[in-house]
Image (spheres, rainbow, N blue to C red):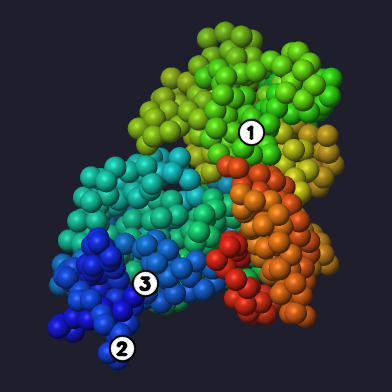
Amino acid sequence: MTYHSQYQILPGFIVTVPLKTTVKEAVVVKEVEKPDFETAEIISVSDKCYSKEQMETAKFISEYYFSSFGEAISLFLPFGKKQGESNCEELIVNSGKVPLLSALQQRAFEQLLQKDKALLFGVTGSGKTEIFISLFAKMLQEGKTCIFLMPEISLTPQMEKRLKVYFGETVAMWHSKLTKKKKKSILEGIEEGKIRIVAGARSALFVPLCNLGLIIVDEEHDDSYKAMTRPRYHARDVAVLMGSKVGAKVVLASATPSMGSYSKYDVLKLDKPFVQTAKNYQFISGDSINHTILHAIHSHYKAGNQSLLFLPTRGNFKYLYCESCGKTHLCPYCSVGMALHRKYRHLKCHYCNFTEVIVDTCTHCGHTPLKSERMGTVEAIEIISEAVEGLQIEQFDRDSITTAKKLKEALSRFETGESQLLLGTQMLSKGHDYANITLSVIMGLDYILGLADFRARERAMSLLFQIAGRSGRAQKAEVLVQTGDPGFFKTYLADYELFIKDELAFLEMADYPPFASLARILIAHKDESKASKITLDTVTKLKMFEEVEIVGHGKAPVERIADKYRFNILLRSKSRVPLLKALHSVDCREIEIDFDPVEFS
């Protein structure tokens, strides 16, 4: 849109403009010569603006991740007027005490200070957080600000506690579950220069901090850093780009680093836990809660210790199926099974949220009753509660943890010992640190290992290491792993780096990232024949690009969502540039492009 104004307005400034019969907020992108057509006048200019670096990063996101510039810039929060006056001047903050580092930690800390970007590869319990705190303190002494990214908001209460011990009110936690009022007060604190460290999930990367000196991406391997809606950016990669634009150091950290980061960046290793304790691994068969699991939970509970039990998904894809014809009870608007939520006595589609009462007759052949065998968190709790009397179980999944308050309360009960078993899904694997956990039970690893995904082995192995790492922080621990393929996991138990090296050799041979670039095109339309035509037209156009391989195209794994038929095209290329060029040549209005996808189902 082109508007005129009697004032000189710089790019990045937020303005209000008339648009048809309404008034909208807009951002000035550039100044142009007066056009031939008539233009409306800008109504007012806000005291908020986006910085040059924010505008450049948004432009990169829109081009690389195939979104509009508007969608990309709306990820960012603009700078306020006061920030130009006070916050961007050097403000020295004396953080006071810093943690005492071991010789190994001290060496890693000093090496990180010398690098613009690096990967800190530290086994679970090796004291990476103490190094982060020391880096924050150093930045604050130099008058700089910091961003600390974590993959899940479930990590924020514990981390907030630890950071506030050292940095008090200069720390703020930022995530999607904050109220509007809380976000406003944090932004005011940033504007006034009181808040110097912002920690939180993906969106914390876009807060308006002046004089940014450091970005830390903890658990950098985690897929939660990849946005699943447009713009489909990867926060880890955008953090590296932002660091280079504003001159900030970027530290990626993980006990199970991603293949891309390990092969791309300088690696600093912490290969010994801070407190060395013995861990006993036991591999068991089956796919349900059996006597071995119940006995282990019972004995650790009786000894006054805490346990952790992992299930791969909320309901482990718990669907109703018919024994007679073998068909699953499907959502009428999507081609997926309706997930069974016994607690709420309903069936729910996890794609379009359609909900209905539990049915017991097959819609295909009329057979009664329908069966459901795979276990969800609610059934697991029922089975364990019945078998282990007195045990208090904390359900830890997205069904039960719906607000920041519920999250804090659940973790607080577990920390004080009020509950003795933490039972849940992927949320459990994300960096929680409790000294009293002496048992980790990992179920459903074979389900993850069997996913139709070139990263299935990496996901399964990473999960094993992450969840095993939650136990034995202060005393010896037991890890029960339920799998039909113990040989695969046993090979690498003592050394994740050996797994990385073997996996990288496999990925290079098979032509997968980080040795090639992938992109996934998603097509959705209410009319199936129209969706199919768009797919074929797009494939025809892409065939003109010799350096781009069409791996496959056709109906998506989930063929229908919210009454729209879905098709996809998977592309691969040796390098990014020809792939980006090819994708920019196709009509993006009726398709969605996921560059560097992490999800294939």
Mark carried by residue 332: 1
The mark nearer the N terminus, 1 or 3, is 3
User: Can you identify the residue that label 2 sits on?
Assistant: 35
State how far apart marks 1 and 3 are (Cα): 43 Å
State how far apart marks 2 and 1 are (Cα): 52 Å
Q: Determine contact: label 2, label 3, CB under 8 Å.
A: no
Give the residue type that dot 2 points to.
Pro
Near-viewer residue (154 or 114): 154
State how far apart marks 2 and 3 are (Cα): 28 Å
Secondary element at tag 3: helix
Q: Residue at x 83, y 34 (%)?
A: 484
> Splitting the image into 4 quarters, where does residue 136 fall?
bottom left
Secondary element at tag 1: loop
User: Can you identify the residue that label 3 sits on?
Assistant: 54
The mark nearer the N terminus, 2 or 3, is 2
Q: Residue at x 38, y 46 (%)?
A: 176
Q: Is residue 393 above or below residue 228?
A: above
Near-viewer residue (300 or 519): 519
